[in-house]
Image (cartoon, rainbow, N blue to C red):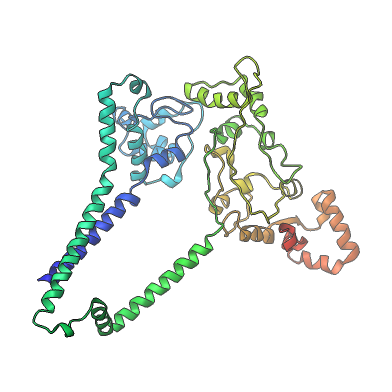
Amino acid sequence: MFRSIKQWCIGALTAVVVLGAFDVSAQPNGEALFKAKCNTCHQPHADGTGPKLFGVRQKWADGGAKEGSIYTWVANWKAAAAADPYAASIVGVKPGEMQMFPDLAGKVDEINAIFEYIDAQPDPAEAAAGTDGAMAEGAATEEEEGGLGWIWIIIGLMFVVIIMAVGGVRRQLNSAGKDAADEKSYMEEFKSWAWKNRKYVGLGGLVVVISLFVMLFLAGYSIGVVENYQPSQPIAFPHDIHTGTNGIDCKYCHNSVTKSKSAGLPTVNVCMNCHKQIKGRTPAQAEKITAIYKAAGWNGDAYTGKTSPIIWNKVHVLPDHVYFNHSQHVVVGGLDCKQCHGDMTKQNETARVVPVQDLNKIEGNIPLTKATLTMGWCIECHGEKEISEGALDTKGSGYYNEIHKRLLNNDKKLYGKYLEDGKVTVKELGGWECAKCHY
């Protein structure tokens, strides 16, 4: 009887732990998803680059949208517009095109989490005029929600106590009528049980050891991998609006990319070249642009001289012992910015380290397998990227013409070897030499 109770308690505790873990980690975080994907263009209660989203599910339902159409719209608005007349009527409400999120396709739970977070946000106008009673009610709700985690902890502790108590009772019943000298300790009982079931214990131990080794190996292998790293920034900068809709060239802002190892960040004066006149069409846009005015010391009519520097958070961080020269890759190598940074004309968010799978979709890119910004990624690119199809002098560059001349004059055999596959790669010109990238 007690053995059955103990097994039932263990099963119940396992269920509590699993449910608790599901409650904590498996449920999508609507706030994080909203801030990562929607916050740049949308606000819950105010129109911005995109329309306000509070109660948008009910709005679509009342407007006659097909069931599930809004979820398709979030992932791929073009597909939704083609399949649903109501979705098609939404197109053109705002001048800019909505960004697509293929990673949300079919993920109704995550999209609903975003909408639930939005619908839970109080209207600032109503909050300002709210009563003390409403504030107290909100505080009580927050306290109630915050206490749910403690309930699971208390229930778990109760089951642990029950299991220990039942185990102690079972131990006392087993030792009833026996001499105290013959009574085994917990460790002796465990050793006896382990020896009796040594095959299963040995197999389980082997599985645990292998699992720990694999976990440690994977953890070590992931050191230095920063794909999808996207730190927050002091000012929201929608790249798709600036480079896509308005057609601003990357080099206008990152103007040192052709003559320096660093691409550089624009000064606030570069921003003010446009934003003296462009002040935002909505209150939300105007509020964001106000941050630029504060940094520049602009009061709307003149510069005050009271500036406040913008502290940007660096995205593409390389170790100190790694040398990378932008101008060498852009001017000499002829690379386009999007080949390493992704197509910024379609990225509404601030800059991030684009995963190699996304970079492989860029037209003209060589398909690579190693994680972005790792040494393997650079080595793989240098081994596959060709400098010139055929003779180097066809490149039309003084740099490569000089290399071509030196090879022909000094080692024609070596030059012929390089051209065995009909192309000259970065590797064949020393792109794999350690000193090229490491001090």
Residue 196: name its quadrant: bottom left
What residue appears at the point 65 percent right and 57 percent down from the top-left corner?
378
Above or below 397: residue 278: above
Judged left or right of residue 180, residue 267 is right
Q: Residue 430's spot in the image, x, y percent?
A: 76, 62
Q: Foreground residue, 8 or 244?
A: 8
Residue 16: name its quadrant: bottom left
Residue 424 visible in rendering: no
Q: Quadrant of the N terminus?
A: bottom left
Above or below 97: residue 414: below
Q: Foreground residue, 54 or 32?
A: 32
What residue appears at the point 29 percent right and 50 percent down from the top-left corner?
23
Q: Residue 53's spot in the image, x, y percent?
A: 38, 30
Residue 14: name its quadrant: bottom left
Q: Residue 326's spot in the image, x, y percent?
A: 71, 47
Residue most toward the top?
301
What residue appears at the point 33 percent right and 76 percent down from the top-left corner?
204
Residue 310 visible in rendering: yes
